[in-house]
Image: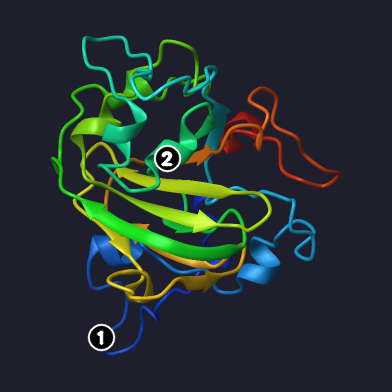
Amino acid sequence: WLKDPRTEKQDYVLPDPDAPDGGFTSYNAFFARSLKNQSQSRPQTLPGRDYVITAPTDALMNTIPMQITDAETPIPTKGTQKLNIQELLAGSKYWQRFVGGTALSCILMPNTYHRYHAPVSGKVVEAELVDGALIGMEDFASFAPANGNVGYYGADFSPFENYKRGYFIIDTGKYGYVAVVPVGLSTVGSVVFQDKYLNADQPVPVQRGDELGHFRYGGSLVMLIFEPGRYASGAIKVRLGNQIGTFDPKSGK
């Protein structure tokens, strides 16, 4: 894994392999590795502008091409399972705010950075972990096809319902509420929140780019949901210098 150039090991805090207790103590310690200098390796675009929304982690990102038109609107699946916004947010008192809203799916690959961060600034007014299956997904490869299009219409989003997940509700103030939903997919055994967001009796201030939590081993997903009229579903906007893709390192050999 460390020899794979896509791991970008120069970006991370790595233990000294020659120390007495050197190296990572477990595979999960490697999998949930921390960034050495986030401001350099993952700088926030225009950090002083409150209207900018940024990716919550390293991910393949697609808009989900439909609006949540009412409380019963199902996210389309290939199979028989369907999921509405109330179920997705496990009965959160804020779920009705997202009826009529839009959503993004952000799929993490096993070799990428597995800590997730706030896409907006504001206050975390609710944060909950939701029980669910810890392992599964018989065919993860078909969910994340080689062409990278993991948000295509008709994609199977049933893992939102069945797998371990959590959600954060962030009040941005003038731009409304944003739901951040981390989901453990194939072989993920943990969805972990930063302690300060759990069981807080007061809203917790958060800045865009602040770490919210991390995943343990496997494939993962972070879903972002916006109130009506706040985020236009469709093409994702980027600025000069933003990453829009990567080369396959093997293609240059």
Q: Quadrant of the C terminus?
A: top right
Horizontal and vertical percent for residue 16? 40, 81
SS label for mark 2: loop
What residue is rendered at 35% in x and 22% in y? 143
Q: Residue at x 22, y 16 (%)?
A: 81
What residue appears at the point 40 percent right and 47 percent down from the top-left corner? Answer: 94
**Mark 2 → mark 1, Cα distance in angstroms:** 29 Å
Give the image location of residue 139, x and y in percent: 24, 21
Residue 115 vs 188, above or below: the answer is below
Q: x%, y% of residue 160? A: 29, 33
For image coordinates 68% across by 70% down, the residue present is 39
Q: As rendered, which of 3 and 61 lies closer to the eye?
A: 61
Looking at the rendered structure, the kind of residue marked 2 is: Met
Residue behind mark 1 = 21
Vertical placement of 174 versus 193: above or below? Answer: above
Q: How many marks?
A: 2
Badge 1: how crowded within 10 Å, few (<14), some, or many (20+)?
few
Q: Amino acid at mark 1?
A: Asp
Q: Which mark is residue 109?
A: 2
